[in-house]
Amino acid sequence: MVSEADLGLTHEDGKYLIRQIQAEVACDQVQAFIAKTRLCGSCGRDKVFGDSTLLGI
């Protein structure tokens, strides 16, 4: 460390950390959404999903 200006994170370090945190938060939000919408609203059991391949139209 040469001066007080060397304390803390650089702008690029801060941007990198924010991107990493945002990626984690987004992943957690998607997982929570999937878990919530996967359950049947009537009975609370897991919904059954069929084949997930794309259909050609």
Image (cartoon, rainbow, N blue to C red):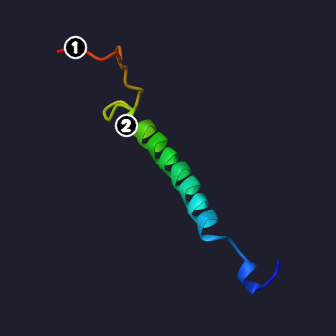
Residue at x 37% of width, y 20% of height:
48
Q: Nearer the viewer, residue 43 or 50?
A: 50
Point out the residue furthest to the bottom here: 4
Estimate the spatial distance between the alpha carbons at disc 1 and disc 2, rounded to whole Å: 26 Å
Disc 2 target residue: 37
* Secondary structure of residue under mark 2: helix
- Quadrant containing the C terminus is top left
Residue at x 42% of width, y 26% of height:
46
Q: Nearer the viewer, residue 35 or 11?
A: 11
Residue 27: x percent and y percent?
50, 44
Residue 34: x percent and y percent?
42, 37
Residue 50: x percent and y percent?
34, 15
Residue 36: x percent and y percent?
41, 40
Residue at x 74% of width, y 78% of height:
6
**The image quarter in which residue 35 lies:** top left
Closer to the observer: label 1 or label 2?
A: 1
Indicate left or right for 17 with 33 as reference.
Answer: right
The label shown at residue 8 is: none
Q: Nearer the viewer, residue 29 or 9?
A: 9
Residue at x 82% of width, y 81% of height:
2
* Secondary structure of residue under mark 1: loop
Say if 23 sits above or below 56 in the image. below
Point out the residue furthest to the right here: 1
Q: Nearer the viewer, residue 5 or 51?
A: 5
- Badge 1 density bin: few <14, some 14–19, many ≥20, Cα 10 Å: few
Mark 2 or mark 1, which is nearer the start of the sequence?
A: 2
Disc 1 target residue: 56
- Quadrant containing the N terminus is bottom right
- Badge 2 density bin: few <14, some 14–19, many ≥20, Cα 10 Å: few
Under mark 2, the amino acid is Thr
